[in-house]
Amino acid sequence: MSLGHEVIDVHSHILLEGVMGFCGAAGPEMGIRGDGVPFFRAGEYVLENVKFVGSPFSDVALRLEHMERLGIDRQLVSPNPITYFYRQPESVAIDYNRRHNDLIAEIARHNARLFGAAALPMQSPEAACIELGRSVTELGLVASYIGSDVDGVMLSDPRFEELWSEHERLEVPVVVHPSPRNVDYRDDPMFGPWDLDILYGFHVDETLAVAHLILAGVIDRHPRLRVHIPHGGGFAPYQIGRLEAGLEKRPWGRGLLGRPFAEQWQQFSFDTAVHRENALAFLVSSQGPDRVLHGCNFAGWDQEERSVEMVNGLSVSDDDRSKILSGNARGLFKLA
């Protein structure tokens, strides 16, 4: 707990032993190679040198211990973005997501400090609606957790329209977290070298998702839809002026939105995983303390060990600090 404030972490993925090998040839699988290098495989994508087995990623007891070390009281447990499996057959994806969500709900039932977000089979929007409803009404999950695109299909595509209406009906937010850009990322000259698909590709994809949701009218048509973007919103909060400039000065922008841009922008929230104090200070000052939630990318290679300390170091009121650390999360996810 931070200076008497509860701390809720909203950026924390999990790998479940119970879904390993449950998506056919795509796996997933995690382990340690003969040369001692830890790995995780989902389809053709292999991530190395991140410890998954016997770590807070996959072991709930170790997770709770690590939360204590970081000063985290409660946590949103979410799918690992490598396991969205949007390229897999619909029937396989539906079964996988149901099992994944069942296991997350089971963990949350036995651990009061954890609450869960639902993975959805987005390659079938109809099945995604059904699974969202089941996850919220039967399993008690508090949000959906999806990619910034579905195998190249942007979230602005009309096929997802009913899914946004279902989020509104159920009064749950959607968290948009990218997955690695493609399975051939190592051969991609732009994003392949130096893990750029993860370092900057995620932020590019988040920024494009925000733009698509606004410019295609998704946010306009769904005024009660709440969208949470990790990693401080990608580049979106820092280039909001350029998006507004397009709406004001480009021919396609005039009259595009039915509701004011500023009103629609309020439907987005962002987390604190930006790695630098000055970046966090800009995010809070520009977006307001009501729409920034604490998130540290728990147990990841890029986990922010000082996430709580960074929030405590902000030049904000004690009430605003409490909002960022936990209050906003309680409101967005309707937590007791």
Image: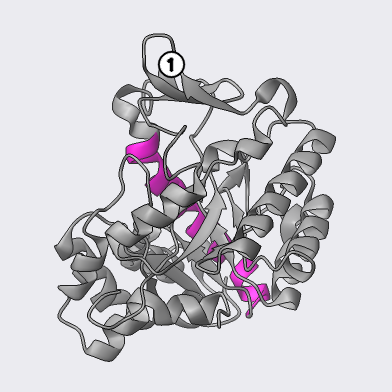
Give the residue at x 39% y 39%: 201
Q: Give left or right: position of 113 versus 20.
A: left
Secondary structure beneath dot 1 equals helix
Height in image: 291 above or below 296? below
Q: Which residue does the numbered mark 1 point to in the structure image?
A: 187
Q: Position of residue 305 (x, y in %)?
A: 24, 54
> Is 205 included in the stretch rendered in magenta?
yes
Instruction: Determine if residue 72 is in view.
Output: yes
The colour style of the image is one colour
**Which of these two is toward me, 333 or 227?**
333
Q: Position of residue 269 (x, y in %)?
A: 44, 71
Height in image: 60 above or below 265? above
Give the residue at x 66% y 65%: 141
Height in image: 73 above or below 275? below
**Which of these two is toward me, 261 or 322?**
322
Q: Position of residue 303 (x, y in %)?
A: 31, 48
Instruction: Determine if residue 231 is in view.
Output: no
Say which amino acid is labelled 1. Answer: Asp
> Is 206 included in the stretch rendered in magenta?
yes
Q: Give left or right: position of 164 versus 287.
A: right
Magenta-highlighted residues: 198-223
Q: Give left or right: position of 284 versus 247.
A: left
